[in-house]
Image (tube, rainbow, N blue to C red):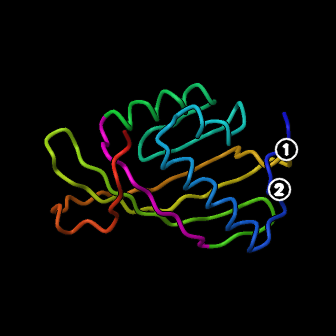
Amino acid sequence: MNPRPPLPPFTEETARQKIQAAEDAWNSRDPERVSLAYTEDTEWRNRSEFLRGRAAVVEFLRRKWEKELDYRLRKELWTYRDHRIAVRFEYEFHDASGQWHRAYGNENWEFDELGYMRSRFASINDLAIAEADRKFHWERKA
């Protein structure tokens, strides 16, 4: 596999670059694109789901974005050290009934020497919100 810069050990600048790349990929809502940032045998915990491997990540993200419509995410650096980054995030989406939600959470990431994420552990809480209370506005993808 080719290196996926920026590579560990991270500085504040390179940790922020890694986070921005992740935010951009997730906001594409393209499961295959997102999965390329992870090792082939990546390990995830997302709420109560435990995943292993890129194929599981792709399937998880397909299911996620079938239910979480008009998804929009923001991530920010919490801390970093060596080959690890911790982020806090929030995202918004609506369900098929039109109810908007905002999710808040934290992720702990660990990277291999080539810059691929080998583990992602996410703790997430959801809140139903009124459409008027949305923070993130954007144009819909065609």
> Viewed as shown, does residue 100 lie left or right of 58?
left
- The residue drawn where x is 65% and y is 73% is 79
- The residue drawn where x is 17% and y is 61% is 131
User: Residue 40 at what x, y percent from top left?
Assistant: 71, 30
- The residue drawn where x is 17% and y is 67% is 132
Query: Which residue carries the number 1 mark?
Result: 3
In magenta segment, residue 59:
no
User: Residue 17 at what x, y percent from top left?
Assistant: 69, 63
Query: Which residue carries the number 2 mark?
Result: 7
Tell me whether circle 1 and circle 2 mark residues in contact (CB < 8 Å). yes
**Which corner quadrant of the image does residue 48 belong to?**
top left
Question: SS class of the residue under badge 2?
Answer: loop
Most common secondary structure along the magenta stretch = strand
- The residue drawn where x is 30% and y is 51% is 93
Disc 1 and disc 2: Cα gap in Å? 8 Å
Amino acid of disc 2: Leu
Q: Is residue 71 above or below residue 59?
A: below
Task: Please state the extent of the stretch shown in magenta in the rendering.
Answer: 67-78
